[in-house]
Amino acid sequence: MDLQITDWLSLGLRWAHIVAGIGWIGASFYFMALDFSLRHRASLPDGVKGESWLVHGGGFYHVQKYMIAPEEMPKDLKWFQWESYATWLTGFALMSVVYYWQADIYLIDRSVLALSKLQAVGISVAVLAASWLGYDVLCKSALKNNQTAMFAVLFVFIVAAAFGLGEVFSARAVFLHIGAMIGTIMTGNVFFVIIPNQKITAAELKAGRTPNPEFGEIAKLRSTHNNYLTLPVLFMMISNHYPMTFGHPMNWVVVALILPIGAIVRHYFNAHDSGKHGRALSWQWPAASVLLLILMVFIAWRPASTTADAPAGETTNMEPSALTEQAFTIVKTRCAVCHSANPTDFVATAPGGVEYDTLDLVRQYAAQIRAQAVLSHAMPPGNLTEMTDDERALLDAWIASEAQ
């Protein structure tokens, strides 16, 4: 009996990661919207920054935000922290099962860099740690009072990381690591800064002392950073299903475009929740749409030096039956080791239930084969079966001939 332990671990952890992520992101979006919706009125009690009236679930909510202690601190004070911790922990566990345990398949691409499993995992963990340390140093630097400059440096840092990781890992792992890096920064903000600062503030208030407002200001700033990083990190995490993104030979440019698209869309909602209107809400969607169009055009383009070209004359002079036979042989040799009713030791069952055991099945999935193995090198994963550029080009020529 084959229990498919790896698949069950992956499924369970992915489910838990999504559930925890929904809780964390939902709380982040809610509290940012709540903060921006606060309105100050003359009748508010001392120490109240603002209030917001909300309607949901058949009732009305009246929320007030205290910047100093209320007259009596409540016995039950809800802390929003475990949503973040659970998201990171389940994400790292999932990364360990898929990318560390199966490093030869998903993390390492020997056509990029021949690494041992230990080396690859060590680099991965070091990258995650360095991402938090580098970001934290940036937030404590002289740029902390210049948010525009800080975000510009952070942007360059993330894009440079995408380029550098592309020289080390598989393309799929590059995007996963960019998402994990941003997620680590966000959870680091909660664990090392936001919650400790809030606990210091709460302790000072309970003791009847006036807390240093800087603690709250720093926590709020880090929370805002997390809010603007949320949409880019979500894109990175779901991109592994779309090789047109991570599989582009210049995928670091894709990262460079996704970062501002996500931030601009998030800015629209924050501006809307703060009550802004008119010109303040007129530029975000057009700007994001233009950047998205640029992204789509860029992904469709391939540098000439990276475009697979078939050996001169070999496919153009080949009989259709011979071309078909060679293409089917390539698929059987390079792809069907996994995509088969009886796969090899790499996997227990054919990924996605896609099998290439017959020519009719290969024809059925020709478009997917082109997307995964020709337009990008996402498949075979880590190029385990050592598919050559000439073989990818021949597959492209055969698929094109089949479409005529």
Image (cartoon, grey):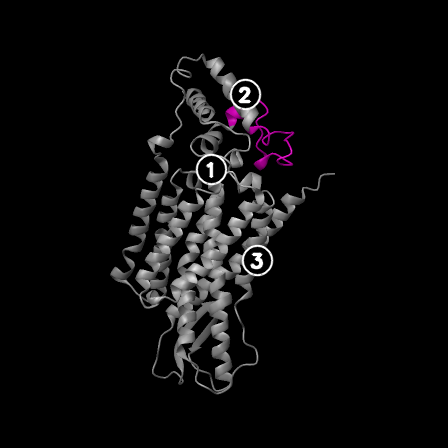
Measured as percent of width and height from the top left, residue 143 is found at 33, 65
Res 329 label: 2
Question: What's the residue type where badge 2 is placed?
Answer: Thr
On the picture, is 63 further left or further right than 148?
Answer: right
Q: What is the residue that sits farthest to the left in this orientation?
A: 279
Dot 1: element:
loop
Residue 146 falls left or right of residue 173 = left
Q: Nearer the viewer, residue 74 or 132?
A: 132
Q: Most prominent secondary structure in the magenta stretch?
A: loop
> At 47% from the left edge and 54% from the top edge, which residue is drawn?
181
Query: SS at mark 3?
Result: helix
Query: Pointer 3: residues within 10 angstroms few (<14), some, or many (20+)?
Result: some
Q: Which residue is mark 3?
A: 89
The residue sitting at 44% across, 30% down in the picture is 374
Q: Earlier in the sequence, mark 2 or mark 3?
A: 3
Please name the amino acid that badge 1 sits on: Val
Can residue 109 be seen by looking at this rendering?
A: yes
Q: Amino acid at mark 3?
A: Leu
Instruction: Give the residues drawn in magenta, as a range.
Output: 335-364
Q: Is residue 57 visible?
A: no
- Mark 3 vs 1, N-terminal side: 3
At 39% from the left edge and 24% from the top edge, which residue is drawn? Answer: 309
Secondary structure of the residue carrying tag 2 is: helix
The image's mark for residue 334 is: none
Q: Which residue is mark 1?
A: 112
Marks 2 and 1, how far apart at CA? 25 Å
Q: Position of residue 255 (x, y in %)?
A: 39, 47
Q: Is residue 324 depicted above or below 136 in this figure?
A: above
Q: Earlier in the sequence, mark 2 or mark 1?
A: 1
Q: Residues within 10 Å of mark 2 (few under 14, many from 20)?
A: some
